[in-house]
Image: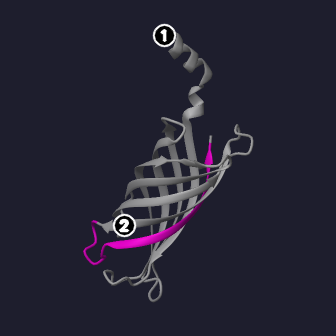
């Protein structure tokens, strides 16, 4: 019991909270399994809990702008997604980390283009310089599979993307 009370006295519950904001941009230009070119821009928010200093589970939400046929007719669609994700950070030296991230989200607004989207991303970030700071910037590259479920004319797509963001807490 003494070990548990000593550990809980040192670690404050808010030290385990996790938050992140990011901007993502990507596209799937005329791939051999897709007859339409596609671009996506999104602003995302992640809120979660760090179970260990490296492992985090989080809920995510995004505001998305999708551009179908972006080289020809330019059909826009605005929607949002909600989902869940997990990340595991590997420290590289003292000041940076690499973090594989997996997540899956689905659209929640009723639009002409609703979809399920699992993602895999690798982030490289800088730890706060003092070790006690609140801000940690990162960049990431990833793959996103888009599975439309309400429009038979839109094929499944595999999209690459880049992310710029920062972690809080």
- Whether residue 39 can be seen here: no
How crowded pointer 2 is (Cα within 10 Å; few <14, some 14-19, many 20+) is rated as: some
- Give the left or right position of residue 112, taking residue 98 as reference: left
* Residue at the spot of label 2: 145
Q: Nearer the viewer, residue 22 or 61?
A: 22
Check the image and tell me how it is coloured. Answer: one colour
Judged from the image, the secondary structure of the residue bearing numbered disc 2 is strand
Q: Foreground mark, 1 or 2?
A: 1
Q: In this view, does 43 lie above or below 156?
A: above
- Give the left or right position of residue 101, taking residue 20 as reference: left
Q: Residue 75's x, y, as percent?
A: 44, 80
- In percent of width and height, residue 110 lies at 35, 61
Q: Residue furthest bottom?
A: 72
Circle 1: element type? loop
Tag 1: Cα neighbours inside 10 Å, few (<14), some, or many (≥20)?
few
Residue farthest toward the left in the current orientation of the protein: 152
Q: In this view, does 159 lie above or below 129?
A: below
User: Which of the two discs, 1 and 2, labels the residue nearer the N terminus?
Assistant: 1
Contact, mark 1 vs mark 2 (Cβ under 8 Å): no
Seen at 59% across and 31% down, the residue is 14
Q: Residue at x 43, y 66 (%)?
A: 143
Magenta residues, start to end: 149-168
Q: What number is the disc on residue 1?
A: 1
Measure how far apart labels 1 and 2 are at the Cα level.
Answer: 48 Å
Dividing the picture into quarters, in which one does residue 11 lie? top right
Where's residue 10, x and y in %?
62, 22
Question: Would residue 158 appear left or right of 14 to someone viewing this image?
Answer: left
């Amino acid at each position: 019991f003494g070990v548990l009370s000593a550990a809980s006295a040192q670690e404050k519950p808010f030290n385990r909270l996790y938050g992140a904001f990011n901007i993502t941009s990507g596209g799937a230009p005329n791939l051999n399994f897709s007859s339409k070119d596609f671009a996506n821009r999104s602003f995302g928010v992640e809120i979660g809990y760090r179970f260990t200093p490296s492992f985090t589970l989080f809920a995510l939400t995004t505001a998305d702008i999708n551009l179908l046929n972006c080289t020809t007719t330019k059909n826009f669609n605005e929607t949002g997604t909600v989902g869940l994700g997990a990340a595991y950070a590997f420290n590289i030296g003292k000041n940076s980390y690499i973090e594989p991230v997996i997540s899956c989200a689905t659209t929640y607004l009723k639009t002409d283009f609703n979809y399920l989207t699992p993602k895999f991303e690798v982030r490289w970030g800088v730890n706060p310089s003092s070790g006690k700071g609140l801000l940690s910037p990162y960049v990431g590259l990833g793959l996103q599979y888009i599975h439309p479920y309400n429009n038979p004319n839109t094929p499944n797509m595999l999209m690459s993307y880049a992310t710029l963001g920062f972690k809080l807490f």
